[in-house]
């Protein structure tokens, strides 16, 4: 049975805001929350039913494919949140030539059956004619981070996995054969920032290829936005042919 290494705190049970703040990391600062894509968005995403009763939003780049792709998995403690929570990230990726699919999954308060939903969404994404199946990554925040970690560690399918503010991990699944992993954390996320150090040590001990991005300040909810420039700089080169 897979041992779960988990920390559950009140903040980690809610989704992460898609906020963007200044690039100056010299001192802690307040997060800036952004609830809608910027005006340069390509218009509404295409909403698709990837399995009965569950949808995802597809943000397509301009031009012909096949494109690299990222499956976006929102947070919310497996109880709240929706595919719209990561709209800004979907627009940002599409603007950089990456097809993004932000997914809804079953919310029961537990990681199951959400794990199966993510697996089905990933399979749907890799089968799209405008997606290069060899260049697909995962990006998950909070509860979505746990789901991203599970899929990446158990299948070894994604090219890379961006794990943002993880409250849960699966150490028995970690090996040197993992896809490349980026751990993302804020020092202001006082419970999960120390936990990210534990994950860093675990991945190092198991020989898994990984990097760590840390933002000074912020909090749990602004982790992705505070670290977005560094996340994009890490992820985009790994989606090249």
Image (cartoon, rainbow, N blue to C red):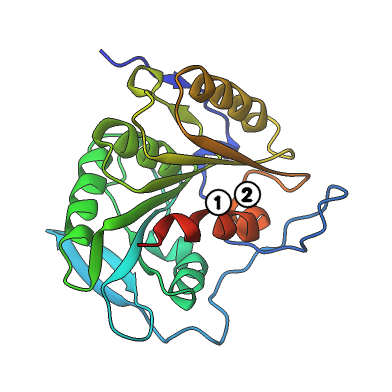
| Residue at the outermost front position | 241
| Residue at the outermost left position | 52
Instruction: Indicate the quadrant where residue 100 lies.
Output: bottom left
Residue at the location (43% across, 86% down)? 42
| Residue designated by label 2 | 223
Q: How many numbered discs sit on the rendered protein?
A: 2
Helix, strand or loop for disc 2: helix
> Callout 1: few (<14), some (14-19), or many (20+) C-alpha neighbours within 10 Å?
many
Of tags 2 and 1, the one toward the viewer is 2
Where is 147 relative to 19, above or below?
above
Helix, strand or loop for disc 1: loop
Q: Position of residue 56 (x, y in %)?
A: 28, 64
Residue at the location (38% across, 85% down)? 62
- Disc with the residue nearer the chain's start (2 vs 1): 1
The disc at residue 16 is: 1
Q: Nearer the viewer, residue 241 or 221?
A: 241
Residue at the location (30% across, 16% down)? 2
Q: Is residue 22 left or right of residue 126?
A: right
Residue 175 appears in the picture as rendered: yes
Q: Is residue 134 left or right of residue 50?
A: right
Q: Kindly check if marks 2 and 1 are in contact, taking CB atoms under 8 A apart as contact.
A: yes
Q: Position of residue 117 (x, y in %)?
A: 22, 47
| Residue at the outermost right position | 27
Picture quarter with the N terminus: top left
């Amino acid at each position: 049975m897979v041992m779960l290494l988990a920390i559950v705190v009140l903040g980690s049970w809610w989704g992460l805001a898609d906020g963007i703040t200044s690039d100056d990391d010299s001192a802690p600062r307040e997060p800036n929350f952004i609830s809608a894509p910027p005006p340069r968005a390509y218009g509404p995403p295409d909403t698709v039913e990837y399995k009965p009763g569950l949808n995802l939003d597809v943000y397509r780049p301009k031009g012909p494919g096949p494109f690299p792709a990222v499956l976006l998995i929102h947070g919310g403690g497996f109880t709240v949140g929706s595919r719209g929570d990561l709209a800004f990230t979907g627009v940002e990726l599409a603007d950089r030539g990456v097809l993004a699919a932000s997914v809804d999954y079953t919310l029961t308060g537990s990681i199951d059956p959400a794990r199966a939903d993510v697996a089905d969404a990933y399979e749907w994404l890799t089968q799209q004619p405008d997606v290069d199946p060899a260049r697909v990554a995962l990006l998950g925040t909070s509860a979505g981070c746990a789901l991203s970690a599970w899929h990446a560690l158990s299948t070894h399918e994604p090219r890379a996995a961006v794990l943002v503010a993880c409250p849960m991990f699966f150490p028995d699944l970690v090996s040197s054969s993992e896809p490349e992993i980026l751990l993302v954390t804020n020092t202001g996320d006082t419970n999960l920032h120390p936990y990210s150090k534990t994950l860093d040590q675990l991945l190092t001990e198991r020989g898994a290829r990984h990097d760590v991005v840390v933002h000074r300040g912020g909090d749990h909810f602004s982790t992705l936005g505070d670290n977005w420039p560094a996340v994009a700089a890490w992820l985009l080169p790994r989606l090249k042919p």
